[in-house]
Image (spheres, rainbow, N blue to C red):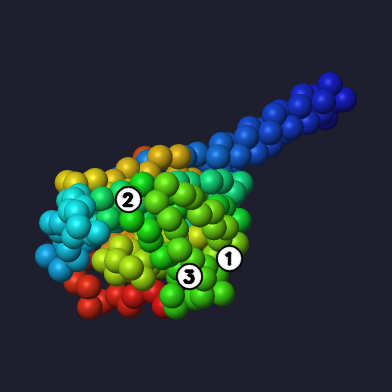
């Protein structure tokens, strides 16, 4: 083989190897959309424990109607998902109802609880008081709480026990709220294996393993019932 031919062979081999590496990188960087519907049983469609009016200090406070899905979210977790920086999210308490009733954040994020009611609220994580101890939140004030450890936390109101706020701390940025029709959509999901979980009314109610392809994934989730899940401590 001549030197010239050898040079051509080496150039071709280098170009082929570069193309293969580029294809692998493109496959690793490929993202898709995971969408679908979540069907909840009747015992998870209540959204709140009470509705109507509360009588407070010789007046009536209207209680807004809760979302029938009760703050249901779908989350994806997997080793290929990159965490995002901490952020600040806001939960407003108005009409003796929290909005949103469920927040998903990354480690170190801060939740601002804003009391828009005319009455005070005594908020805490009663089963994890070392995380968020009881503290009165007067009308028109804000309480800022940082959540530094992964896990699931239920913020309760000692004055109005029907108010419950789910705080999910996860390293995955991939999640979506379920709308009134049960639909959800999560964009920019890296292709690969993942764990899909459904959170509703203060606890996980469904979990399954899925494989996300470059074409995406469309799933139909049927939650069997609340008895399959255990409320977060």
Helix, strand or loop under label 3? loop
Q: Position of residue 177 (x, y in %)?
A: 32, 48
Q: Earlier in the sequence, mark 2 or mark 1?
A: 2
Q: Earlier in the sequence, mark 3 or mark 2?
A: 2
> Is residue 129 placed above or below 44 in the rendered structure?
below
Q: Residue furthest top?
A: 4
81 to the left or right of 56? right
Q: Position of residue 100 (x, y in %)?
A: 34, 50
Helix, strand or loop under label 1? loop
Q: Residues within 10 Å of mark 1 (few under 14, many from 20)?
A: some
Identify which residue, 198 or 202, lies in the foreground.
202
Identify which residue, 222 or 89, lies in the foreground.
89
Helix, strand or loop under label 2? loop
Q: Report the quarter where the N terminus lies.
A: top right
Q: Residues within 10 Å of mark 2 (few under 14, many from 20)?
A: some
Q: Residues within 10 Å of mark 3 (few under 14, many from 20)?
A: some
Kindly identify which numbered label has been placed on residue 118.
Answer: 2
Identify which residue, 106 or 141, lies in the foreground.
141
106 to the left or right of 124? right
Q: Residue furthest right?
A: 3
226 to the left or right of 141? left
Residue identifier under label 1: 149
Dot in front, 3 or 1: 3
Q: Position of residue 220 (x, y in %)?
A: 22, 54
Residue identifier under label 3: 134
């Amino acid at each position: 083989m001549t030197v010239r031919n050898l040079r051509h062979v080496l150039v071709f081999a280098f170009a082929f190897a570069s193309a293969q590496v580029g294809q692998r990188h493109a496959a690793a960087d490929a993202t898709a959309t995971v969408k679908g519907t979540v069907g909840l049983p009747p015992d998870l469609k209540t959204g709140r424990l009470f509705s109507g009016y509360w009588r407070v200090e010789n007046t009536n406070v209207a209680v807004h109607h809760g979302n029938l899905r009760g703050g249901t979210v779908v989350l994806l977790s997997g080793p290929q998902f990159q965490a995002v920086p901490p952020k600040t999210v806001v939960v407003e308490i108005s009409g003796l109802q929290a909005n949103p009733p469920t927040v998903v954040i990354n480690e170190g994020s801060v939740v601002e609880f804003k009391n828009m009611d005319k009455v005070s609220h005594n908020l805490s994580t009663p089963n994890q008081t070392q995380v968020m101890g009881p503290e009165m939140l007067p009308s028109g004030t804000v309480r800022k709480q940082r959540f530094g450890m992964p896990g699931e936390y239920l913020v309760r109101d000692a004055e109005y026990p029907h108010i419950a706020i789910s705080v999910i701390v996860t390293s995955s940025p991939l999640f979506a709220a379920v709308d009134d029709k049960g639909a959800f959509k999560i964009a920019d999901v890296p292709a690969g294996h993942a764990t899909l979980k459904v959170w509703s009314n203060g606890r996980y109610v469904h979990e399954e393993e899925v494989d996300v392809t470059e074409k995406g994934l469309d799933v139909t989730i049927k939650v069997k019932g609340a008895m399959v899940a255990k409320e977060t401590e």
